Amino acid sequence: MCTDESGSEFKCFTNKGDKKCTYVIHNAILWDIMNFSNLTMITVGWHRQSSMDGLDLSVNTQDIVWKNNAKEVLRSQCSTSCSPGHRKVTSSSIYLCCYDCAPCSEGEMSNISDSENCMKCPEDTWSNENRTFCVLKKMEYLSYTMDIISVVLSCLSTFFCILTVLILIIFVSKHNTPIVRANNKNLSFVLLVSIMLSFLCVFLFLGRPVDGACMLRQISAGILLSVSVSSLLAKTLMVCIAFKATKPGSVWRRWTGVKLPNYVLLICSSVQVVLCMSWVTFSPPFQELDMHSYKEKIIVQCNEGSDLFFYSVLGYMGSLAAISFITAFLVRTLPDSFNEAKHITFSMLVFCSVWIAMIPAYLSTKGKYMVAVEIFAILTSNAGLLGCIFLQKCYIILFRPELNTRKHILGLNNTMLHQ
């Protein structure tokens, strides 16, 4: 039953269940929570049966008084919507419908509001700063155009290569002079060519790695450096043999020809060639994409294929350098006119120091800086050989031709022998 304004009761619904009365909507305002007598009721609308349109609801929102005199309609939920880049997490509230918003983790994204979960980006992408979409990871390698390191290394390699060619031209044009002949000109030519090619092989390390370049750059560097060191070892042995052969009746005279240094060069270099060919045959280097060392970039690098072969090639080259250094050190006190034992000693000291220092630096770096370390070792060691062995001789050939005579060399030699 319902009551009208006069207090009379009547049925609220017809026999069919239709509503007959009008409901008045009040806004209840409690001014003092401790005193319910201060309750004010304000009519803000009604709900009634309309003969034309059925149910009719009317609310005057301007008359509603909200808490703290707020003028806008309250939200019907206890949490704000989570923006893209965030996900819903369980709230500490007692109400199950309430939740908090947490930003997506690195490498994840969400591009809709109120996302339940964040989506993980594909392996070759990474989430942007706002975690709203995935972007492609940056490819990192020693680029010819994007890295100043590549430009510097390219310029150094080109400069030293041109310098080596000029020295080779000088030695070829003066191949009959005493200072060139006294230092075994054939070994000098082989050494200069191997040094020049070593400088050129630096360009195999630059640019985006591919399978072919990955195979060529390691074996070319290993073989060419071994040829250089083998040439110096042959030179050092010839210094020792040449000095011993000066004594009357010496059995070393039979070894003073060109066969012994050629054999030494061929045998020592062949071992490295066999190692490199085995490396390429059984476990060749190849291009690799390292997606896990860094979060926001992919390192395009060469996988050496087999660490055993890599360190075998490096170790054999180091063994040749150590033998050459020890041999040159032992004969360094021989007369200088018999060849460059002192210069070979110093050049091998530079060579060994560079490659010993390279190993920990190589192992402690990643990406393009690891490649830069190897390039720097190649450039520095070859530049050391070039400077220690040939620059003094070029100075004598070009600026002190009076010292480049057989008489001067023999005179200096005899003086040193008498001393």
Image: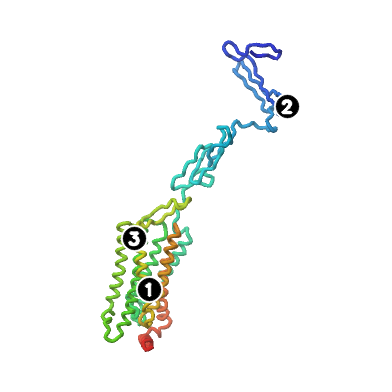
The number of numbered discs placed on residues in the rendered structure image is: 3
Residue bearing mark 2:
35
The answer to whether mark 2 and mark 3 are in CB contact below 8 A is no
Question: Vertically, is 322 above or below 124?
Answer: below
In terms of depth relative to the viewer, which is nearer, 50 or 409? Answer: 409
Q: Secondary structure beneath disc 1?
A: helix
The x and y percentages for residue 264 are 30, 72
Estimate the spatial distance between the alpha carbons at disc 2 and disc 1, rounded to whole Å: 103 Å
The x and y percentages for residue 318 are 37, 67
Amino acid type at circle 3 is Phe
Residue bearing mark 3:
309
Mark yes or no: residue 359 visible. Answer: yes
Mark yes or no: residue 193 visible. Answer: no
Q: Residues within 10 Å of mark 3 (few under 14, many from 20)?
A: some
Residue at position x 63%, y 31% from top?
Answer: 74
The picture quadrant where one finds residue 13 is top right
In terms of depth relative to the viewer, which is nearer, 5 or 177? Answer: 5
